[in-house]
Amino acid sequence: MTQRVCFTLRVRPDRLAEYRERHAAVWPDMLRALSETGWGNYSLFLSDDGLLIGYLETEDFDAARAAMAERDVNARWQAEMAPFFEGTDGASADESFNVIPEVFHLEDQLAAAEAEEFAGE
């Protein structure tokens, strides 16, 4: 079963432009590491006030995070990105995700409704 994960972080307002620039051309070895460790359909969204929202799909979020933690490229990337974030208290960004619980997913509810209708026939 695929987990859909949404999380937030906060980017420092004075670093928004540079954060966007850095993510316009993420290191190829970082991209490969994310893909190889199960970070599927991964997107980041950044508002003008610094709210960063991340979304990904994975088979096991804890395993995907642990696998990335073992990658040298991740350690280098996290060190480069650390100054961009507020409220991480010295932890890396990937250790500071505020994961938001999912409360609705259209396809799941449609599938359940269709199964219910089929069972009632």
Image (cartoon, rainbow, N blue to C red):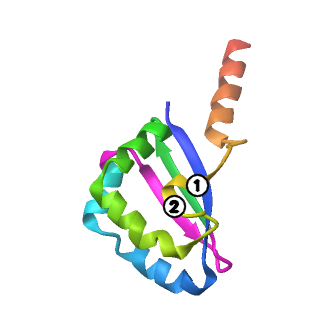
Whether 42 is among the magenta residues is yes
Rendered location of residue 117, percent (x, y)? 71, 21
Rendered location of residue 2, percent (x, y)? 49, 36
Splitting the image into 4 quarters, where does residue 66 fall?
Answer: top left
* Distance from the alpha carbon under mark 2 to that under mark 1: 7 Å
Splitting the image into 4 quarters, where does residue 111 fall?
Answer: top right
Is 68 rendered above or below residue 112? below
Say which mark, if any, is on residue 97: 1
Rendered location of residue 32, percent (x, y)? 28, 56
Number of dots carrying numbers: 2
Secondary structure at badge 2 equals helix
Whether 77 is among the magenta residues is no
Residue at the (71%, 28%) spot, across then down: 113
Of residues 115 and 28, the one nearer the viewer is: 28
Q: Identify the residue at the far front of this view.
A: 90
Q: Are marks 2 and 1 in contact (CB under 8 Å)?
A: yes
Q: Which residue is labeled 2 in the image?
A: 93
| Left/right of residue 25 with respect to residue 114 in the rendered view | left
Is 42 rendered above or below residue 10? above
Residue at the (55%, 82%) spot, across then down: 16
Per the rendered image, the range of residues in magenta is: 36-51
- The amino acid on which the numbered mark 1 sits, given as a three-letter code, is Phe
| Left/right of residue 78 with respect to residue 52 in the rendered view | left
Of residues 78 and 37, the one nearer the viewer is: 78
Is 5 rendered above or below residue 23? above
Rendered location of residue 37, percent (x, y)? 34, 45
- The amino acid on which the numbered mark 2 sits, given as a three-letter code, is Ala
